[in-house]
Each structure stands twice: as structure tokens, then as C-alpha cells.
Image: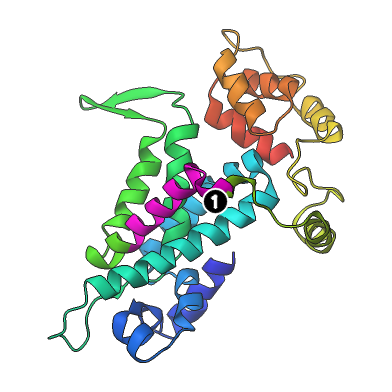
């Protein structure tokens, strides 16, 4: 929401491209405020639409690791990718050029860092063919990412690659980074402050990175109690994947039953119910 509103506000003033990163602006002119503003604003309508779609689609990872660790992942990937972008600008700087390369603004670091767990941790649930070409339910997400990656050639390719590197660093658990999270007191204070604005539940299930509560599970069961059973029993690997994301096993089985064993649809049902 913040990225979308900021992009619309800045875009109406014609200043989105003015927030881009370049060697001259960051190193020579010391406009360090760009390091904070550039990852928050998309530069075009197409990038805004595809970017917000990916950020919304990847919300499943907050359920998987909890809000506390997910926020740290957001900050870690953004800081590391922005640092790598500055290093890349310095390495690619052309002394004969007066302007140099300007990188496309936007949360590329976060979006492409999330592609790493998406590739390794989210299984393929369905496969299909279009004119002889093989696709899966994950293909459209990859195509959206590819469109963003190549939207401005080097200007968008460099931020995307830096985001992938940040995602691999987190995935490889460098220096035990996966165990780092914000203090529980700060997390609880944030939950009390923002939960009434974002949810009707007074105690959101991911406020402390825990599993879904029993109250939400009963609501889910009540909501889909009359649904027809699936054609086959839910695959155990699909159940294990949903349980690993923090959902109750019985809720996961019932969601898979409603979704006809489509794990993507089942995940969306669980997220909406909680």
C-alpha cells in the first residue's frame, strides 16, 4: 500500500525517474536520501501493476516465517540489495560520461529476493501445455518477474540481480541470519498498535510468528463445512507444505479438499480465512 500510494503521488508530479540511483547523485553529490526513497517508488504504471501483484502474491512467506522475521527479511533484502546496487554503479561508472547509469527505482531488492524462497520452497501443484510449451501454476509469477527484470534493460536488470543475491544470502543463512528477529516487546507493541487497523481480530495469528489460532481454525471449518469432498485424498506433501507455513493440519486438509488438492488455491483460502 505504501509503495502504491507513493508511486501514484510521485508519478502525478512527474518525479518518479528523478528518484533513481546513480553514481553521480549518490557518491559525488552525496544525495543519500535517495537510498531511502528509491526502493519505495515505482517509475511506471506497468512496473507498479506487476510489482504490487508480486508483493501481494508473496504474502504467503509472512505466514511461513511469521511477521516478525518477515519484517527483518524485508529490511535485510532491501539494505543488502541497495548496497550491492551502489557497488555495481561504482564498478560500472564510465569516467568519460557525465551522467552514467541510473537504476530504475522500486522495491526490486525485496521482490527478487522473494523469488528465491518461491523457487525452492513453493512446490508446483499443476502443469499444463499451451501450443506444445510446458507451463506450471508458477510460470505466470516468473513471467511477471521477467517482465520487471527486463523492463528497462540494465537499469532494471542490475537491481533485480542484486535482489536475487540478497535472497540467496538469506536462504544460505549467512552468519545465522534466519534466527535474527526483532525483540518480542517491540513486536507485541506493533501488534497492539496496527492490528485494529489491519484486521478485525484482536490477536492476529502471526503477531509473534506463531501458528494459526484454534479460533480461526474453527471459523475456517464452519465456513467450508458444507463443501464437497475432493476426488482423491490430499497428497501428504501438500499437507506438509501448508503445515510448515504455520497452518493447522486439519485446516490444511480441509482447504485442500475445498480446492480440489490445488495447493495454491488452498493457501489463498487459508490466508483469507485467517
Examine the image and state in which quarter residue 65 appears: top right
Comparing 234 with 248, the one in front is 248
Q: Quadrant of the N terminus?
A: bottom right
- Name above or below for residue 233 compared with residue 222: above
Q: Quadrant of the C terminus?
A: top right
Q: Would residue 104 be visible to someone looking at this image?
A: no
Farthest residue to the bottom: give it.
Answer: 29
- Display coloring: rainbow
Q: Residue at x 42, y 46 (%)?
A: 168
Task: Judge left or right: residue 153 versus residue 258.
Answer: left
Q: Residue at x 49, y 84 (%)?
A: 33
* Residue 159 placement (x, y as % from top left): 35, 63
Examine the image and state in which quarter residue 22 appears: bottom left
Q: Would residue 236 be visible to someone looking at this image?
A: yes
Residues shaded magenta: 159-176
* Residue 171 placement (x, y as % from top left): 48, 43
Amino acid at each position: 500500500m505504501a509503495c502504491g500510494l507513493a508511486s501514484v503521488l510521485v508519478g502525478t508530479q512527474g518525479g518518479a525517474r528523478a528518484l533513481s540511483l546513480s553514481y553521480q547523485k549518490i557518491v559525488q553529490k552525496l544525495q543519500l536520501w535517495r537510498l531511502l526513497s528509491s526502493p519505495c517508488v515505482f517509475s511506471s504504471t506497468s512496473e507498479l501493476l506487476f510489482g504490487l501483484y508480486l508483493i501481494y502474491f508473496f504474502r504467503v512467506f509472512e505466514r511461513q516465517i511469521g511477521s516478525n522475521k518477515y519484517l527483518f527479511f524485508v529490511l535485510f533484502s532491501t539494505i543488502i540489495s541497495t548496497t550491492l546496487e551502489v557497488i555495481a554503479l561504482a564498478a560500472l561508472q564510465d569516467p568519460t560520461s557525465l551522467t552514467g547509469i541510473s537504476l530504475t527505482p522500486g522495491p526490486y531488492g525485496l521482490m527478487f529476493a522473494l523469488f528465491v524462497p518461491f523457487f525452492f520452497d513453493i512446490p508446483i501443484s499443476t502443469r499444463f501445455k499451451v501450443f506444445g510449451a510446458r507451463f506450471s501454476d508458477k510460470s505466470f509469477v516468473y513471467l511477471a518477474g521477467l517482465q520487471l527484470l527486463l523492463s528497462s534493460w540494465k537499469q532494471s536488470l542490475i537491481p533485480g540481480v542484486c535482489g536475487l543475491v540478497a535472497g540467496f544470502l538469506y536462504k544460505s543463512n549467512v552468519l545465522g541470519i534466519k534466527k535474527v528477529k526483532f525483540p518480542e516487546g517491540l513486536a507485541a507493541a506493533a501488534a497492539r498498535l496496527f492490528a485494529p487497523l489491519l484486521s478485525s481480530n484482536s490477536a492476529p495469528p502471526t503477531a509473534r510468528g506463531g501458528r494459526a489460532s484454534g479460533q480461526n481454525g474453527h471459523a475456517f471449518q464452519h465456513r467450508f463445512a458444507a463443501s464437497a469432498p475432493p476426488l482423491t485424498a490430499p497428497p501428504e506433501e501438500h499437507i506438509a507444505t501448508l503445515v510448515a507455513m504455520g497452518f493447522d493440519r486439519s485446516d490444511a486438509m480441509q482447504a485442500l479438499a475445498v480446492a480440489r488438492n490445488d495447493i495454491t488455491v488452498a493457501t489463498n483460502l487459508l490466508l483469507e480465512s485467517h
